[in-house]
């Protein structure tokens, strides 16, 4: 079994990343996956309800943001790339809200397929300061019909010649089916385009068979590996065993395993690399994985090696976890954050 190679993030590496940032501009990434609207109701709890033993939130502010694959798309845009977002929406008011938000984020809604049999996904988070009290979901978790899948593939086939790579975002809402993944892989590979996938633990490894790169977190990787979860989840030293099992089961060419404060473990070309994380203060990890795959894909298609692209993605994640909710990381914020880590 290959040994783990730890990559120190030196001043030279940081300068290379800073000099590389302009090359992210105009790179085109196709993102395929469920989209949603994230709603935030924020305030302060000062009392318990006389009606039931639950806290009463005095609302101070409300916010609406792009979620799920739409957050990946807005991160691609804010980092300088061009997103082609292929997804599903319902024939409802949520679709109108989403389209308006995409317009503000400079992300096209031209490739959204309307499925009248499901609502536009919305998630309402009720928060007291930085603490979640409850989340309310409006969604339908059901695999799409063959008819809708064909409409999605028509969008993919029409746009695949113009993109640099494809990212499949699986949130297990039903848009990403096993047959859709296989069709996307076939079409993308025929066009010479790499397919990256952000998997979901509810789907088996065979679901993602043949993708070029898979990016699970450690817990997701344990599930995908088919190994004993109870024995492995509290033993991160088993990460190499887990990673090799995931590669074998998915037949993916490369694996990037995100591990929170332990950074990322990368399996590529028979070698295993470890890069550190760069988050200084964590307020909210919501959407951090979306930022990672956006930065990672842009880094790869613009000429960075996989470890270098992962370094950049870790810096980008460090920017967004210091904020609340799904927020995009801009190229300017990324540049500033990389430079700040140079200081003692």
Image (cartoon, helix red, strand yellow):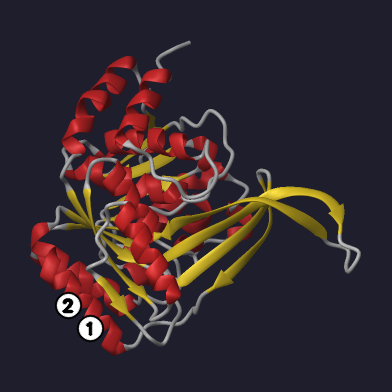
Marks 2,1: beta carbons within 8 A: yes
Q: Position of residue 172 (x, y in %)?
A: 45, 71
Q: Residue at x 33, y 67 (%)?
A: 208
Quarter of the image where one finds residue 129: top right
Within 10 Å of disc 1 (Cα), the crowding (few <14, some 14-19, many 20+) is few
In this view of the protein, can residue 58 be seen by the observer? yes
- 51 with respect to 131 (left or right): right
Q: Nearer the viewer, residue 313 or 78?
A: 78
Q: Pointer 2: what residue?
A: 154
Q: Pointer 1: what residue?
A: 150
Q: Nearer the viewer, residue 21 or 179?
A: 21
Quarter of the image where one finds residue 22: top left
Label 1 secondary element: helix
Label 2 secondary element: helix
Quarter of the image where one finds residue 91: bottom left
Within 10 Å of disc 2 (Cα), the crowding (few <14, some 14-19, many 20+) is few
Q: Quadrant of the N terminus?
A: top left
Q: Position of residue 55 (x, y in %)?
A: 81, 57
Up/down of 224 relative to 42, above or below: below
Q: Nearer the viewer, residue 75 or 231?
A: 75
In this view of the protein, can residue 214 be seen by the observer? no
């Amino acid at each position: 079994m290959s040994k783990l190679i730890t990559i120190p993030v030196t001043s030279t590496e940081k300068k290379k990343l800073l000099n590389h940032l302009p090359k992210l501009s105009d790179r085109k990434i196709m993102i395929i996956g469920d989209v949603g609207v994230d709603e935030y109701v924020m305030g302060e709890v000062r009392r318990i309800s006389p009606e039931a033993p639950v806290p009463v939130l005095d609302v101070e502010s409300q916010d609406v943001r792009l979620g799920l694959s739409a957050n990946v798309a807005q991160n691609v845009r804010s980092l300088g790339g061009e997103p082609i977002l292929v997804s599903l929406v319902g024939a409802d008011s949520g679709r109108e809200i989403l389209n308006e938000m995409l317009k503000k984020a400079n992300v096209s809604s031209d490739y959204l397929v309307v499925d009248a049999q499901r609502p536009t996904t919305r998630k309402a988070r009720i928060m007291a300061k930085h603490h979640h009290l409850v989340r309310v979901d409006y969604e339908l978790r059901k695999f799409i019909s063959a008819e809708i899948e064909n409409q999605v593939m028509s969008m993919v086939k029409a746009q695949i010649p113009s993109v640099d790579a494809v990212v499949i975002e699986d949130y297990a809402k039903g848009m990403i089916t096993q047959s859709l993944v296989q069709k996307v892989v076939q079409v993308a590979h025929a066009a010479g385009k790499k397919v990256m996938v952000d998997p979901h633990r509810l789907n088996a490894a065979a679901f993602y068979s043949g993708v070029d790169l898979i990016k699970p977190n450690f817990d997701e990787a344990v599930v995908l590996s088919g190994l004993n979860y109870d024995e492995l989840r509290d033993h991160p030293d088993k990460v190499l065993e887990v990673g090799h099992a995931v590669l074998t089961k998915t037949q993916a060419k490369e694996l990037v395993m995100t591990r929170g404060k332990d950074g990322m473990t990368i399996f590529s070309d028979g070698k295993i690399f470890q890069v550190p994380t760069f988050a200084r203060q964590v307020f909210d990890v919501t959407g951090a994985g979306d930022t990672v795959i956006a930065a990672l894909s842009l880094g790869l298609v613009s000429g960075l090696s996989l470890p270098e692209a992962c370094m950049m993605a870790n810096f980008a994640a460090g920017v967004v976890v210091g904020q609340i909710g799904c927020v995009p990381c801009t190229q300017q914020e990324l540049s500033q954050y990389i430079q700040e880590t140079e200081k003692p």
